[in-house]
Image: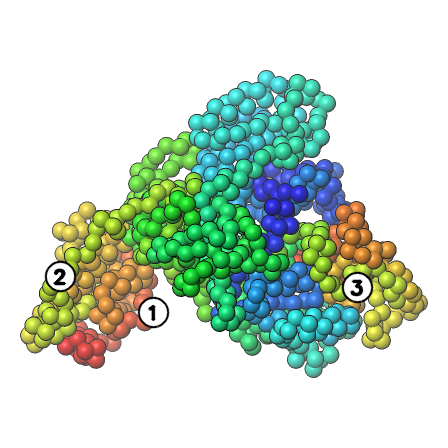
Amino acid sequence: MSLLRFITCGSVDDGKSTLIGRLLYDTRQLHADQLAAVEADSRRRGSDLDLSLLVDGLLAEREQGITIDVAYRYFATEARTFIVADTPGHEQYTRNMVTGASTADAAVILLDARRGVLRQTRRHSHVVALLGIRRVVLAVNKIDLVGYDQKTFEAIAEEYREFAAGIGIAEVECVPVSALDGSNVVARSPRMPWYDGPTMLGWLEGVAVEDDRRSGPFRLVVQWVNRPGPDFRGAAGMVLGGTVRPGDAVRVFPGERETTVARLVTFDGDLAEAGPGESVTVVLADDLDVGRGAVLAAGDPPAVADACQADLIWMGEQEMLPGRRYLAKIGARTVGISMDTPRHRLDVDTGAQLAAKTLGLNEIGLVNVHFDQPVALDPYRANRNLGGFIVIDRMSNATVGAGLVRFPLRRASNLRWQELSVDQAGRERLNGHRGCVVWFTGLSASGKSTIANLVESRLHGEGRHTFLLDGDNVRHGLNKDLGFTDADRVENVRRVGEVAGLMVRAGLIVLVSFISPFRAERALARGIVGAGEFCEVHVDTPLAVAEERDPKGLYAKARRGELPNFTGIDSPYEPPDSPEVRLDTTALSAGEAADAVLSRLRELGVC
Amino acid sequence: MTHLDWLESEGIDIMREAVAESDRPVLLYSIGKDSSVLLHLARKAFYPSRPPFPLLHVDTTWKFQEMIAFRDRTVAELGLELVVHHNPECVALGVNPFEHGSATHTDMWKTQGLRQALDERRFDLAFGGARRDEEASRAKERVFSFRTADHRWEPRDQRPELWRLYNARKAPGESIRVFPLSNWTELDIWQYIERERIPVVPLYFAAERPVVERDGALIMVDDDRLPLRPGERPEYRMVRFRTLGCYPLTGAVPSTATTVREVIEETVAATTSERQGRVIDRDQSGSMERKKREGYF
């Protein structure tokens, strides 16, 4: 008996919970006690039998009367077993739909016959197409409420087929159903003699789950190295594409080392062949160092690239910030990544490409993604499992995005580091001191620039080579194209971090005086220079004190709403957790604060 | 690929991924049929190595005697490491379902006991045999399910799970519960047990057992600690259990199914869902979700 995974898309009002409840009820998946509980619940709400109550699980959603997350349901018929991902239809829950669609082979898209093809129908279809689901059934529900009318159904079906073909959904079946009375869900309806297509269940039982993966090139991602003793070394993982047999030549990526498959080991004995979805342990003929994350491949090779262009679905509460460093899990590897400004954002209702500087929760865009090391990948169209990745926030560890690789960008092979014969160490010897970044962060009017100025004067007096990058000054030139949105602040800090890094390589002590409100970007700046070359100074002044000082009158303006995105007022400041120096300016004079910074620099061996 | 092959392979994939992404994994072994399947998958996932983690049984001292015997036999035969934890507070107070009520009994022995065992041995990842089809609140739980440092589950703050990419990153002190059987149904479990000939506790098969009928449930008199109410006289009836837990809280069902095949036939024809035998689930509406938020498995 085979397995079909499908998703259901539609809104609460379309009767989706009722439709799933009807499938479970009519295929007799319900036990007497479950039925009794639903009947009791239904009576409390004043109806005979409300099948949607079967499906609405968590307390919170019962209280609100809505479905809040992806829920999985299971049922079986004589022909097949089914796993249903039940995903909600509200606009704000695109991420749940993407999640459910990522493992589905088919989709049920639901609409209300009285309302026809709506914006949300198109939205669901765009997501389904993007995630590579090619088999769709359109359930035209509540057909009872339009008098089982053939014309209404046919008009909707025609409109939808035309739309679906335009967005690349190859196979569409349209079925007129009533989840409420059960028409054409499991059993044919005598009320619609004009309809001669399959019932919904009939379609689900019969739909051919194509196995393109089987004919594709062999792929296996190594999850775990199995080494019970010196005599056995196996690479454990699931076959994610193609087939493999002992004796096959395979290559190990990255690195492109060639070897041969010696054995396919399982608990139940060695296999003569393994295909997609099978978890095996591969023993290779040569004793290569194949670790977790390596990709075994044959035939058309995967790309090895440190950048790609990808469709990105943003799932984080905080918007995606171009230039910020995130993590990505792809295959069995977790690597550092950053994204450029989106090339465009997709309007999922119309398919239009819109200009965008960032992506917010539930937005989908096309972006260039940079990995901090080369990774093996396939286009998502060719292989879901080697072309899909998740984006993880470094601070919260939350999954904040899902990426679908369109194609690799081979930037790394065209752009190389020029070898330089005079290096940083040489310049430092000439200067008589080391280069480093002294990064002053804190609220506006906290005293950063005053203290940084004093520190520079003293260093200069001692014969040190210095340079001071001041936030305001840099915004007049290098960064004059940037504003004060979160995305622009990230880019502002990234550029200054890069410039400071270049100056450190020139052997200078670089003083940076920037509000730099976000931890992640300060961490990025720290990462640009070497260990021990970054001294973070938190000029720690309470907001009330800074606001009281307000030498430029900025806080007053911000409070009047004339300066949007002002740090501390309507834009957050994230204080450092463990700065090299913390200066309490309510207790220290500017001179004492400068002394504290200088003594720390001596401890760090800078001067 | 049949649906059982698919479920097996997915379970193996999940277990390998979890082990590779954690420092101190453990398998929560409750001795039931789901645990038996979970253990079987673990043996397959890491073969020819042994499963690279110990088994943890959070015991309540009120389990069926046959369960404990089966547990010890299984561990000895397979050469596995077993950790048995008894909540010392419960031992000292002699917590039992009769004087303290089923809710307190379960909370203290199982929920608190599990937290203690995980904290004491600093396990950062625990495999469990929970299935999404068991109960409505389980249907939305992730395969990799996070617990805060105080072991709470936040249903509104779960990470989306896409493709087979499980995000296992966590802060120090946080832990993960991993459910490789998430996508299995009760029927899948029995069909797989039949196909793979997996040993299970004999209590799952019908036999003449001494039971009393109490509050609509058939309670087996497993030892002399069960206080009989006035008028209750144990009588031998042909019964079996669909789930196993603490014997005073686990209802038997009348049955003549003495083989796995007969159990499957009975399951297909079943008119009641399996957790119905569990007294603890019916304490209050939505009780499973409430327990889970507090750290129950």
Q: Are marks 1 and 2 on the same chain?
A: yes
- In the rendered structure, which disc, 1 or 2, sits on the residue that comes first in sequence? 2
Q: Quadrant of residue A547?
A: bottom left
Q: Do the residues labelled 1 and 2 touch (CB within 8 Å)?
A: no
Q: Are marks 3 and 1 in contact (CB under 8 Å)?
A: no
Please name the amino acid that badge 2 sits on. Answer: Leu
Q: Please state if A475 lies on the left or on the right of A59 as rendered.
A: left
Looking at the rendered structure, the secondary structure element under dot 1 is: loop
What residue is pinned by disc 3? B203
Q: Which colour scheme is used?
A: rainbow
What residue is pinned by disc 1? A577
Please name the amino acid that badge 3 sits on. Answer: Leu
Q: In which quarter of the image is residue A156?
A: top right
Residue A568 percent across, percent down from the top left: 30, 59
Label 2 CA crowd tier, 10 Å (few <14, some 14–19, many 20+): few
Q: In which quarter of the image is the N terminus of chain A?
A: top right
Task: Name the one closer to the observer, A89 or B240.
Answer: B240
Q: Do labels 3 and 1 share a chain?
A: no
The residue sitting at 7% across, 72% down in the picture is A430
Looking at the rendered structure, the secondary structure element under dot 2 is: loop
What residue is pinned by disc 2? A420
Q: Mark 3 lies on which chain?
A: B
Residue A302 percent across, percent down from the top left: 38, 47
Label 1 CA crowd tier, 10 Å (few <14, some 14–19, many 20+): few
Label 3 CA crowd tier, 10 Å (few <14, some 14–19, many 20+): many
